[in-house]
Image (cartoon, rainbow, N blue to C red):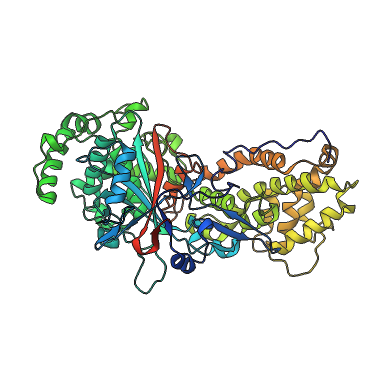
C-alpha cells in the first residue's frame, strides 16, 4: 500500500454508526433479561438486540439492528417490564400496575405532569431472528429488520393499532399462543419543534382515536399502497374519513396497515390543530366551518362527549413552521386526487394543470420509502460493502430483482438497468482495494481479475467451478453496443456469465487508472463508491410506478426505528427518539 494513502473515516450518512457500532452494547437501568428468556431467544445478555450475519466463506459480522442510542451516547437498550393482566414487581420489590413504570419514564422524558396525556409510537421486534445469511434474511422478516408491527401507546397500558383489535389494545409483548418467543416493543417519543409536548400528545391522541375508529387493514400489507403519503392527500383522507366517504371503507387501495396508519396519524396530527380557525385555514372558510361542525358531531357520536373548547388544541403546525401556504397544502377532493394520480402514473405531470400534491417530504414529518429505499436499507444492514464485501453486496442487489418487480410492476430489464451501475461502481471500488495489491499490466493477466470474476460468477448462481470473465463473451452484442443495448438484446437470457461480465465493466475500462492509483484503504474506497452512486440511487427513488397494481410509496413498521437511529431521514423540525424496550414481566428480572 502506498505510504501516502491514509484511510478517512466513513461519513455517518454512508454507514450508520448505530447499526455498525463496534463497541460493546450498553444495558443500563434496573432490569435485565432473564437467563430463561435468553435461552429461548437463542442469544446472550450482552448481545440482545443484535444480529450475527454469516458470510459465504464462514466468517461473520454483527449488526445492532434493534438497538438505539441511549442518553449516555452509547448504543444499547433499556428494559422495563409490563403485565397486561395484572401487576409486576418494581425496582423496590413492590408490586405495581402493569404499565406504571413505563408511564413514569415517559412522563419524565416528555416533561409531563401527572394529568397530561401520553402519546408514544412503538415498534415490535423479534430478538429470536438473530443469526443467518443474507439469503435467509432476504426471505424473512429481516427485510424489515425483524420489526413486524408499529403501534401507538396512550399510557395506562392502552395501545392503538391497525388492525384495531391487535393485541386487544394492550401491549401484547408476551407473544402469541403456542409461541415460546415474546414480542418486545421499543417505545419512541415523537416531538415537534417549539410545541409543548403535552399539547402535541393531546392532538395526536385525538387524531389517532378518530382515524382508528373503524380502521381498515389491507389483505397483504407488504404489497399495499400508501396513498396519503403527501400532506394534500393526508388532509383529504382525514376530512373524508370523518365525513364517512364510502371509498375509504370499501376500496382496499386506501386501507392502512399498521405503520401506514401511524404515519397518517402523524401527517395529520402535526399539521391540523383541532379548532375552528385551523379547520377554516386549511379547508377553506365555508368548507372548514362545515367540516368542523361535522367533526364535532362525529366526536359526540363516536366518543360520547361533546367536542367542547376543553377538547380543542391550538399550536403552530408543521406546515406553517416550514413556510408553506394554505394554497400549497390544500386538501384534494377525490376527483382532484384521481386526476393527479393518473397524471403521475402516466408521466404527464409536467403538462398537468390540475391541483398537484406537494412532494411527500414537504410538510410531513417523514416521507415514505420507495422500493429503492427498501433494497438500499437492507443491503446497508446485512450485506454491507465493508463487512460482507462487494461481491455479496452485488449479489444481494441482483437478488432483490424478483420482489422489486412484484412490488412495483417494472420489468426485469428496468430493474437491472438501474441496479447495474451500482454494482459496477462497487466492483471498481473492490478492485481499488485489492487489485493494486498485486499490480498487473492488464486485467487479462491479473490473478485478481480471474479470481474475482469466478467468485462473482458463483455468487450470481453460476454452476461451473471456474469462470474467466476476461475471455471473449459468447454474445457478440456485448462487444459492440452500450449497456442498454446489451441488456435489451439479452431479454430472457440474463445468465450469470453475462451478469458477471457486465458487473466488471468499470474494472476493465478503468484498469490503468486503478493500477496507477495504488491500493486504496477500505474506508476511503467505500466512501468514494457511495459518493459515486448517490445519483444512481436517486434515479431509482424517482422511478414512477406506472402499473396501477404497483406500489409507489411504502411505510414499513421499521421506519420509526430507522429514523430514530439516523438510518432514514425525517423532517428536521421533528424529533423521534427510542427511549425504552418493553418486555413481558416474566422475561425480565431486577439486576443483582
At x 75%, y 60%, the residue is 455
Q: Quadrant of the C terminus?
A: bottom left
At x 35%, y 40%, the residue is 190
154 vs 11, left or right, is left
- The foreground one among 492 and 66 is 66
Q: Is residue 183 visible?
A: no
User: Which residue extends farthest bottom?
Assistant: 178
368 vs 107, left or right, is right
237 vs 366, left or right, is left
Q: Number of marks in the image?
A: 0
Whether residue 389 is situated above or below residue 137 in the rendered picture: above
x, y percent for residue 296: 12, 41
x, y percent for residue 42: 51, 67
At x 66%, y 39%, the residue is 527
Q: Is residue 525 visible?
A: yes
Whether residue 276 is situated above or below residue 297 in the rendered picture: above
| Snapshot quadrant of residue 292 | top left
x, y percent for residue 302: 13, 51
| Snapshot quadrant of residue 11 | top right
At x 46%, y 65%, the residue is 35
- The foreground one among 128 and 423 is 128
- The foreground one among 227 and 521 is 521
Q: Quadrant of the N terminus?
A: top right
x, y percent for residue 563: 45, 43
Amino acid at each position: 500500500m502506498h505510504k501516502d494513502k491514509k484511510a478517512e473515516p466513513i461519513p455517518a450518512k454512508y454507514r450508520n454508526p448505530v447499526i455498525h457500532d463496534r463497541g460493546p452494547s450498553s444495558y443500563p437501568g434496573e432490569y435485565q433479561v432473564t437467563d430463561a428468556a435468553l435461552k429461548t431467544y437463542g442469544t446472550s445478555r450482552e448481545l440482545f438486540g443484535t444480529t450475527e450475519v454469516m458470510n459465504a466463506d464462514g466468517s461473520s459480522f454483527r449488526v445492532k439492528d434493534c438497538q438505539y442510542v441511549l442518553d449516555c451516547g452509547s448504543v444499547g437498550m433499556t428494559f422495563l417490564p409490563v403485565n397486561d393482566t395484572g401487576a409486576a414487581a418494581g425496582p423496590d420489590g413492590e408490586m405495581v400496575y402493569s404499565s406504571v413504570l413505563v408511564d413514569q419514564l415517559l412522563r419524565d422524558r416528555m416533561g409531563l405532569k401527572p394529568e397530561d396525556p401520553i402519546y408514544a409510537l412503538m415498534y415490535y421486534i423479534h430478538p429470536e431472528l438473530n443469526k443467518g445469511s443474507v439469503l435467509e434474511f432476504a426471505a424473512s422478516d429481516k427485510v424489515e429488520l425483524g420489526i413486524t408491527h408499529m403501534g401507538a401507546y396512550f399510557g395506562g397500558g392502552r395501545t392503538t393499532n391497525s388492525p384495531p383489535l391487535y393485541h386487544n389494545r394492550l401491549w401484547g409483548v408476551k407473544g402469541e399462543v403456542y409461541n415460546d418467543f415474546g414480542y418486545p416493543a421499543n417505545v419512541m417519543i415523537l416531538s415537534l419543534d417549539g410545541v409543548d409536548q403535552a399539547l402535541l400528545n393531546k392532538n395526536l391522541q385525538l387524531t389517532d382515536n378518530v382515524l382508528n375508529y373503524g380502521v381498515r387493514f389491507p389483505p397483504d400489507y407488504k404489497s399495499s399502497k400508501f396513498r396519503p403519503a403527501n400532506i394534500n392527500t393526508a388532509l383529504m383522507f382525514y376530512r373524508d374519513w370523518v365525513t364517512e366517504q364510502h371509498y375509504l371503507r370499501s376500496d382496499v387501495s386506501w386501507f392502512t396497515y399498521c405503520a401506514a396508519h401511524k404515519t397518517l396519524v402523524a401527517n395529520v396530527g402535526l399539521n391540523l390543530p383541532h379548532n375552528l380557525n385551523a379547520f377554516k385555514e386549511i379547508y377553506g372558510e365555508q368548507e372548514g366551518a362545515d367540516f368542523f361542525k361535522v367533526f364535532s358531531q362525529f366526536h359526540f357520536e363516536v366518543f360520547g362527549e361533546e367536542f367542547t373548547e376543553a377538547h380543542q388544541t391550538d399550536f403552530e403546525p408543521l406546515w406553517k413552521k416550514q413556510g408553506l401556504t394554505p394554497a400549497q397544502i390544500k386538501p384534494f377532493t377525490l376527483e382532484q386526487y384521481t386526476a393527479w394520480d393518473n397524471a403521475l402514473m402516466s408521466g404527464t405531470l409536467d403538462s398537468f394543470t390540475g391541483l398537484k400534491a406537494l412532494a411527500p417530504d414537504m410538510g410531513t414529518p417523514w416521507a415514505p420509502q420507495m422500493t429503492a429505499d427498501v433494497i438500499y436499507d437492507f443491503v446497508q444492514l446485512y450485506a454491507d460493502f465493508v463487512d460482507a464485501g462487494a461481491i455479496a453486496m452485488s449479489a444481494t442487489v441482483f437478488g432483490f430483482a424478483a420482489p422489486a418487480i412484484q412490488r412495483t410492476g417494472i420489468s426485469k430489464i428496468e430493474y437491472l438497468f438501474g441496479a447495474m451501475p451500482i454494482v459496477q461502481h462497487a466492483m471498481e471500488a473492490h478492485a481499488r482495494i485489492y487489485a493494486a495489491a498485486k499490480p498487473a499490466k492488464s486485467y487479462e493477466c491479473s490473478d485478481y481479475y480471474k479470481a474475482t470474476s469466478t467468485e462473482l460468477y458463483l455468487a450470481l448462481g453460476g454452476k461451473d467451478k471456474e469462470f474467466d470473465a476476461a475471455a471473449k463473451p459468447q454474445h457478440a452484442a456485448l462487444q459492440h453496443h452500450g449497456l442498454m443495448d446489451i441488456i435489451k438484446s439479452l431479454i430472457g437470457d440474463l445468465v450469470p456469465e453475462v451478469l458477471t461480465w457486465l458487473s466488471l465493466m468499470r474494472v476493465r475500462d478503468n484498469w490503468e487508472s486503478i493500477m496507477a492509483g495504488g491500493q486504496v484503504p477500505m474506508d476511503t474506497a467505500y466512501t468514494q463508491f457511495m459518493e459515486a452512486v448517490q445519483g444512481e440511487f436517486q434515479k431509482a427513488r424517482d422511478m414512477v410506478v406506472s402499473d396501477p397494481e404497483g406500489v409507489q410509496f411504502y411505510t414499513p413498521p421499521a421506519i420509526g426505528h430507522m429514523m430514530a437511529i439516523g438510518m432514514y431521514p425525517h423532517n428536521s423540525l421533528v424529533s423521534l427518539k427510542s427511549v425504552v424496550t418493553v418486555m413481558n414481566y416474566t422475561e425480565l428480572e431486577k439486576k443483582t
